[in-house]
Amino acid sequence: MFNLGSDVRLRQKAHDAVISSIDGLPIMNQIQAMRVFVRIVDMGSFTLAARQMDLSAAAVTRAVSALESHLNMRLLNRSTRRLSLTDAGRHYFDGCRAILSKLDEVESDLMCATRDISGVIRVASTASFSVTGLGPLLAAYRRLNRKVQFDLTIFDTHVDMIEGGFDVCFTTDRDTLAASLVSRRLVSIKDIAVATPGYLAVHGEPFDSHALLNHDLLTVSEGLHTWGRIAGGRRYCEGRLARGSEEV
């Protein structure tokens, strides 16, 4: 006769046993014993489970006995001809399978997260940044990821990251980035007006911003084109000279 109350009590007792704190059985031993128990049920045989797990028949038997002793209930009905689960064993088996599946998933995720990063990273950088700030960044990354190699491209004007197949690009905010790209500001660099002693010897030294009207502005071709951006925000004259690279 089916007894609903008895079945519910068995289910609860088996569930409590799965998640209970460990008293007499060390946690690692219990996890291994649970794996052995699940394998026995899956294989339908102590002998086959022992062979597949590379354990002795005695070790497999001891694992199940330890679980039954710890839970104080029989999990398996054994005979010379067949092996079957008790009601409590069936509920415990379902719980063990769920716990071990989740444990394997967590361990797999951790192993993937900590696995050594390797491969080639295609890097593009402006010529100016390549000689001022790029070296230390790449060196620091390599110290953390020894198996990573860099394929470096230096450019003077504009580079298309997507068309060029680059993974990372160090550029200025003068370049318009595609909406699909993610950008992060690394440093802020201000433009200042400078002149060589030779230039000043020929053209004279400007003592205020208005004097810049009579001086040439040497700039990158896609950069500043007026003195106004430098001298107080007012536009004084167009840049008379330009070059394609930021590196001077």
Image (spheres, rainbow, N blue to C red):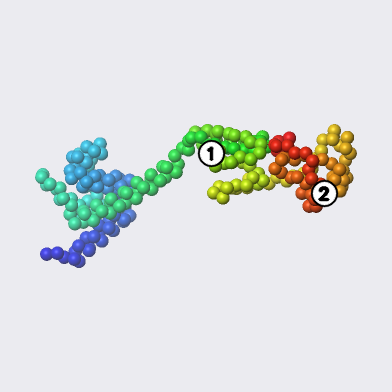
Q: Nearer the viewer, residue 54 or 152?
A: 152
Report how far apart the C-alphas of labels 2 and 1 lie in the structure: 41 Å
Q: Amino acid at mark 2?
A: Tyr
Q: Amino acid at mark 1?
A: Gly
Check whether the beta carbons of the residues at disc 2 and disc 1 lie within 8 A of each other: no
Q: Nearer the viewer, residue 223 or 23?
A: 223
At mark 1, the secondary structure is loop
Q: Residue sitting at 54 percent across and 42 percent down?
A: 162
Q: Residue sitting at 19 percent across and 64 percent down?
A: 6
At mark 2, the secondary structure is loop
Which quarter of the rendering shows the C terminus? Answer: top right
Image coordinates of residue 87 in percent, x first then y, are: 19, 57
For the question of whether residue 137 can be seen, the reply is: no
Image coordinates of residue 205 in percent, x first then y, are: 88, 40
| 34 left or right, relative to 245 | left
Assess disc 1: are there few (<14), some (14-19) or many (≥20) residues with their C-alpha within 10 Å of its C-alpha. Answer: few
| 12 left or right, relative to 81 | right
Residue 95: image quadrant is bottom left
Q: Residue sitting at 12 percent across and 47 percent down?
A: 82
Pointer 2 residue: 236
| 192 left or right, relative to 8 | right
Image coordinates of residue 144 in percent, x first then y, are: 53, 38
For the question of whether residue 185 can be seen, the reply is: yes
Pointer 1 residue: 165
**Name of the residue lying farthest toward the left:** 81
| 109 left or right, relative to 203 | left
